[in-house]
Every structure is written in structure tokens, then in C-alpha cells.
């Protein structure tokens, strides 16, 4: 198993007990970011911190990529693709 000690940035998905007005703003900004990155694609909200978006990727079995809402190094808001682990940061 690989250690995360060598990684420069660490992504942490928000937990349900972290629900707040700040995470509400973060969720709205994340949806805006996904709509900007993937215009015209349908976004499905699974729960407070998980989204699905249509994808044309050959590597997606379902045609939907799942994105997790979280924070990098406790300071940068981000969404992470659960399939390929690509991370996109955004501002509120």
C-alpha cells in the first residue's frame, strides 16, 4: 500500500457532521464549477457532498462520473473525481 506522506497536497472529503452554511456555499460553488467544466452535462446530487455528472469517458462503465466535495490541506475547496482521482479547486 502506498503512503500519502510523499504527496504535496492531501484531499479530504467532507463528512456529514460538517454540514454548515459554509459547506452549503461550498456545494453551490462546486456545482457551478462542474457546470463550467462540463457545459450541457446533467448533474445529479446524490447527497450533500457527492455529485454525479454525465461523461463520455471510455473508462466510465456507467456513463456517470462521481465527484466528492472536500478540502485540500484544510484550506482549498475542491471536488475530486472518484474514478480517476483528478481534483479541481474552486473559490467561494
Image (cartoon, rainbow, N blue to C red):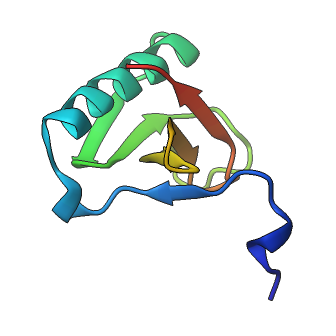
Residue 66 drawn at (x, y percent): 47, 49
Q: Please give left or right for residue 82 compared with residue 49 in the image.
A: right
Q: Is residue 4 above or below residue 90?
A: below
Image mark count: 0
Residue 48 drawn at (x, y percent): 22, 48
Residue 28 drawn at (x, y percent): 27, 24
Q: Please give left or right for residue 4 compared with residue 54 in the image.
A: right
Q: Residue at x 67, y 53 (%)?
A: 85
- Let me know if residue 49 appears in the view: yes
Where the C terminus falls, by quadrant? top left
Q: Residue at x 81, y 60 (%)?
A: 7
Residue 13 drawn at (x, y percent): 44, 57
Q: 72 or 81: which is nearer to us?
A: 72
Q: Please give left or right for residue 66 compared with residue 27 in the image.
A: right
Q: Residue at x 52, y 52 (%)?
A: 62
Q: Residue at x 51, y 24 (%)?
A: 90
Q: 89 or 35: which is nearer to us?
A: 89
Q: Is residue 67 above or below residue 56?
A: below
Q: Quadrant of residue 21?
A: top left
Where the N terminus falls, by quadrant? bottom right
Q: Is residue 36 above or below residue 89?
A: above
Residue furthest toward the bottom? Answer: 1
- Let me know if residue 67 appears in the view: no
Q: Is residue 88 above or below residue 12?
A: above
Q: Quadrant of residue 20?
A: top left
Amino acid at each position: 500500500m502506498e503512503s500519502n506522506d510523499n504527496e504535496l497536497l492531501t484531499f479530504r472529503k467532507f463528512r456529514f457532521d460538517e454540514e454548515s452554511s459554509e459547506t452549503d456555499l461550498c456545494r453551490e460553488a462546486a456545482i457551478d464549477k462542474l457546470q463550467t467544466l462540463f457545459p450541457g452535462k446533467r448533474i445529479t446530487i446524490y447527497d450533500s457532498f457527492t455529485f454525479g455528472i454525465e461523461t463520455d469517458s471510455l473508462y466510465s462503465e456507467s456513463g456517470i462520473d462521481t465527484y466528492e466535495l472536500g478540502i485540500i490541506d484544510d484550506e482549498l475547496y475542491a471536488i475530486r473525481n472518484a474514478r480517476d482521482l483528478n481534483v479541481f479547486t474552486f473559490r467561494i
